[in-house]
Image (cartoon, helix red, strand yellow):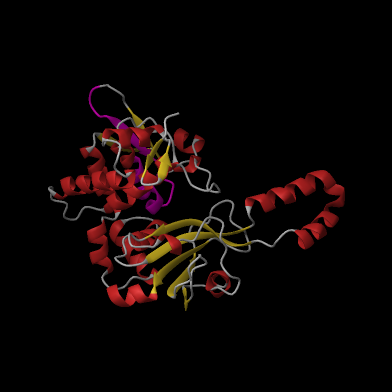
Amino acid sequence: MERVRVGGRLYSDPDVVALIRASGGLADPRSLVLNQAGKLNEQYRLFDSTGVTPFARLVQMASLKGLEVLAMDTERRRNENRDAVILMNGKSKGKKGQIFYNPDRPSGRVAFSVAHEISHTFFPTTSGGARFREMCDSDSREANELERLCDLGASELLMPREEFQQEVGREWSVTRVSRLVQRFGGSFEATLFRLASAHPGTAAAGLLKFRRRKEEQRAIERMQVVVGQRSLFSVQTHITSEIPEPKYRRQSFHMSDHFPDHFVVRWNKSFDTDSIVCKVAEAGGVLTADEPLPSDSEPEGRLEAVVAPYQRDDADPDHPDVLFFWISKSKSRERT
């Protein structure tokens, strides 16, 4: 398997490597994807889109890339657990391919997934066209590099940076997300993440899950296998004394262009039990407080937390997934 190092990071996905090679081998694939998404947005702006809904806009943009956007039939919806998929036609005449979406899923998730599949066409080979975001292990240290890049392209297609910033104005807050969802058509989660990535200063957002570290969970499972169900009570007692309790841990992390590396909340890092992220489920609504991020550097910032509207199948029933948005206090004063 060929590997290419660009900007201190190693890439091995065949589609990503092909994109890097096509650019001369030196360009960061993130900038390449954003550049292509920007070009497609510019191409679309040449047409009159007055009164066009966000989803219809994506359908028209897909057409510019030679793609049809079609609803999945009943059988496909029943047999496939996915929001959308792109199927390329190879060298056949006519349309280059089709994007099939599941109309039974929430409209915001569908819109983002369609934009994600359009982004697959930014890669010269698109050998991963039939791969889906759902196939990535959400508990891995890093999601599949191709899928993350397609998510990056999807954000730019669905919520173009300049238009998004103009719509936000000076109100960079979770309380603004619902109105932004209506304007751009994305999911609450994707829109909140875009609030961070499009911020002109120092901001971050992410998803937190109430869980143990993977190695801690594996230790529990090994104990249960060894002792067996007959001694389950003693196993639980031993677990309580030996294995750390679950905490709200970083699951995904999205940041602005100016976000310093030493501010980044690393994978598996947990928030303090006194943080508002641990209180928001019981309190409800959006909680706000001045808190540092649990990173190597601890600058002051405004932290907002809200229970994620979409709860994944593996969410803790008593401690739901939480979304957070954070802005550095010094940067927020300077730039907002």
Name the quarter where the N terminus is drawn.
Answer: top left
Asked if residue 72 is among those painted magenta in the image, a careful observer would answer no
Residue at 15 percent of width and 50 percent of height:
45
Quarter placement of the C terminus: bottom left
Q: Name the residue at the top extreme.
A: 92
Residue 108 highlighted magenta (yes or no): yes
Residue 329 quadrant: bottom left
Q: Position of residue 64 (x, y in %)?
A: 21, 39
The x, y position of residue 88, in whole percent, is 33, 29
* Image label count: 0
- Asked which quadrant contains residue 2, the reply is top left
Q: Position of residue 136 (x, y in %)?
A: 50, 42
| Residue 102 can be seen, yes or no | no
At 44% from the left and 39% from the top, the residue drawn is: 132
Residue 100 percent location from the top left of the image? 37, 37
Residue 164 left/right relative to 305: left
Against 295, residue 132 (above or below) is above
* Closer-to-camera residue (165/336): 336
Q: Quadrant of residue 200?
A: bottom left
Q: Is residue 297 visible?
A: yes
The magenta-colored residue range is 93-117
